[in-house]
Amino acid sequence: MKGKDEIEHDGIIAEVTPEYISVEIVASSACSSCHAKSLCGMSEDERKVLTLPADPYSEWAPGDRVRVCTKKSMGLKAVWISYVVPLAILMILILSLSPVIDNEPLRGLVAIAGVAVYYLLIWIFRDRLEDEFVFYIKEK
């Protein structure tokens, strides 16, 4: 039963090691349920592999069908980190640099460089972020 505060994806266990369990999930685009997806050509399914810490007492085996879950708040946090904050940085830089830099292409490049620095910081602190985003496995 799906909880109101959970995000779930069905998957198949690909590999089990003492430290990690690899689960393959199919990420569907929003168009996958559309009745016209065969005509449009925009709908694509992409296979992704999540690597989760293994529970030493679990008895998962490759090929088992499972559900990979996380809290909805983690999904919203990911959206903020990956989309909303960079957009805000871009807009703030473009608008605040208007009176300072008269050259529009240069102003755009500086704003894009600001967003690049943000993503560089995200990459540097990826281990800390990885600890915050917790996924867990449920039986299907």
Image: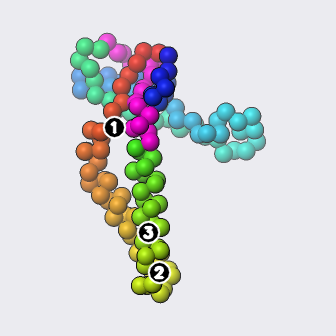
Residue occupied by mark 2: 98
The residue drawn where x is 67% and y is 33% is 33
Q: Residues within 10 Å of mark 1 (few under 14, many from 20)?
A: some
Which tag, 3 or 2, sits closer to the chain's start? 3
Amino acid, disc 3: Ile
Give the distance between the C-alpha atoms of the residues marked 2 and 1, in whole angstroms: 37 Å
Which tag, 2 or 1, sits closer to the chain's start? 2
Image disc number at residue 92: 3
The residue drawn where x is 45% and y is 84% is 99
Mark 1 lies on a secondary structure that is loop
The residue drawn where x is 28% and y is 28% is 53
Kindly give the residue lying farthest to the bottom in the view shown: 102
Indicate the quadrant where residue 16 lies: top left
Residue 17 in view: no
Residue 56: x and y in percent read 23, 17
Q: In this rendered view, identify the residue nearer to me: 30 or 24.
A: 30
Residue 90: x and y in percent read 45, 66
Q: Which residues are magenta?
A: 59-76
Q: Residues within 10 Å of mark 2 (few under 14, many from 20)?
A: few
| 17 to the left or right of 109 | left
Residue occupied by mark 1: 133
Mark 2 lies on a secondary structure that is loop
- Do the CB atoms of the residues marked 3 and 2 lie less than 8 Å apart? no
